[in-house]
Amino acid sequence: MDIELTKIQYKILNSFQQYRLDKVNYSADLIARDTKISIYIIRENLPFLLENKLIDTDLLEKETNYYRITNKGKSVLLNQKEETKDKLIWSVLVPLVTAVVGSLVTNFLFPK
């Protein structure tokens, strides 16, 4: 099951793992502060992340508005980073290598 995230949803999910630490008891206010996104936009996007089980409410207090990232959310972030790396390789490095090899072959076959 592949989940497509918008840029805002990705920023929200990514804010849970700043500085290589998992944040627990992370409220919408803190997410808004860290991502510099409006609190209203954060609150609109949190239900999507909760429905897809990318984040979860704090287990200690059921009636709170505190969230934590789940293992599924961590794997979605990891997959997103891998996809970005693959896009970079295929969009920059492969054309560059092709151009260099093509230039070398052309210069070798047709010297001045």
Image: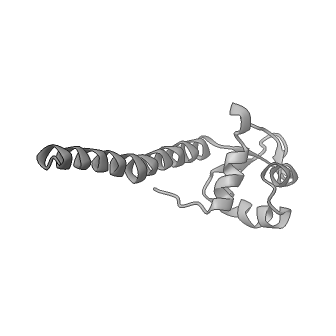
Taking the spot 71% from the left edge, 64% from the top edge, the residue there is 45
List x then y, in percent, for residue 51. 64, 60
Q: Going by the picture, which residue comes out furthest to the front?
A: 112
Q: Nearer the viewer, residue 111 or 23?
A: 111
Q: Nearer the viewer, residue 89 or 18?
A: 89
Q: Going by the picture, which residue comes out furthest to the left?
A: 109
Image quadrant where residue 91 sits: bottom left
Taking the spot 61% from the left edge, 63% from the top edge, the residue there is 6
The colour scheme used to paint the residues is one colour
Classify 99 as above or below 38: above
Classify 49 as above or below 26: below
Instruction: Note whether residue 21 is visible.
Output: no
Q: Is residue 99 rendered to the left or right of residue 37?
A: left
Total marks placed: 0
Classify 3 as above or below 93: below
List x then y, in percent, for residue 49. 66, 57
Q: Nearer the viewer, residue 70 or 91?
A: 91
Image quadrant where residue 25 sits: top right
List x then y, in percent, for residue 87. 44, 51
Instruction: Note whether residue 71 is visible.
Output: yes
Taking the spot 83% from the left edge, 63% from the top edge, the residue there is 38
List x then y, in percent, for residue 79. 50, 46
Taking the spot 73% from the left edge, 60% from the top edge, the residue there is 46
Q: Is residue 87 rendered to the left or right of residue 24?
A: left
Q: Is residue 4 rendered to the left or right of residue 25?
A: left
